[in-house]
Image (tube, helix red, strand yellow):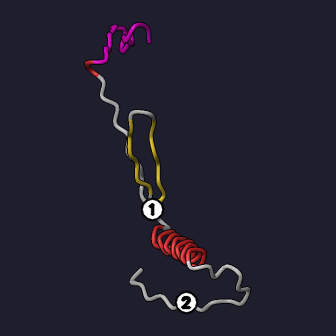
């Protein structure tokens, strides 16, 4: 392709294809999702989404609890703390 043109020969006949004749579409097969952005393309595997949401929720909850312990000066205690969390995820 030179200068936005592509030349092709089919059955001894020459054709010139320009960008006006071309449309590029990106699609992802299941279980993947695709999103095109100005700076690139993101491809996400949604197969383990529930598992990842649960893990993310757990990590965020632990981080929040540690922040609370630090704010109320409970960091000096070495014993474990029991936390009960009820969630729909």
Q: Is residue 82 found left or right of 34 in the rendered image?
A: right
Is 51 left or right of 27, judged from the image as shown?
Answer: right
SS at circle 2: loop
Residue 58 in view:
no
Residue 83 disc label: 2
Q: Position of residue 44 (x, y in %)?
A: 47, 54
Q: Secondary structure at mark 1?
A: loop
Q: Residue at x 43, y 8 (%)?
A: 2
**Hey, which quadrant is residue 86 in on the image?**
bottom left
Position of residue 87 in the picture relative to residue 84 (left or right): left
Name the spot of residue 28 as percent of width and height, x first: 41, 49
Q: Which residues are magenta?
A: 1-19
Q: What residue is disc 1 on?
A: 46
Considering depth in this image, is 82 or 26 the residue closer to the camera?
82
Give the residue drawn at x 52%, y 73%.
64
- The label nearer to you, 2 versus 1, is 2
Image quadrant assignment for residue 46: bottom left
């Amino acid at each position: 392709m030179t200068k936005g043109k592509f030349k092709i020969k089919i059955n001894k006949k020459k054709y010139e294809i320009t960008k006006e004749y071309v449309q590029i579409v990106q699609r992802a097969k299941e279980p993947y999702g695709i999103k095109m952005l100005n700076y690139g393309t993101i491809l996400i595997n949604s197969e383990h989404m529930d598992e990842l949401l649960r893990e993310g929720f757990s990590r965020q909850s632990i981080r929040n609890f540690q922040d609370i312990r630090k704010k109320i000066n409970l960091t000096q205690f070495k014993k474990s703390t029991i936390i009960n969390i009820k969630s729909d995820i």
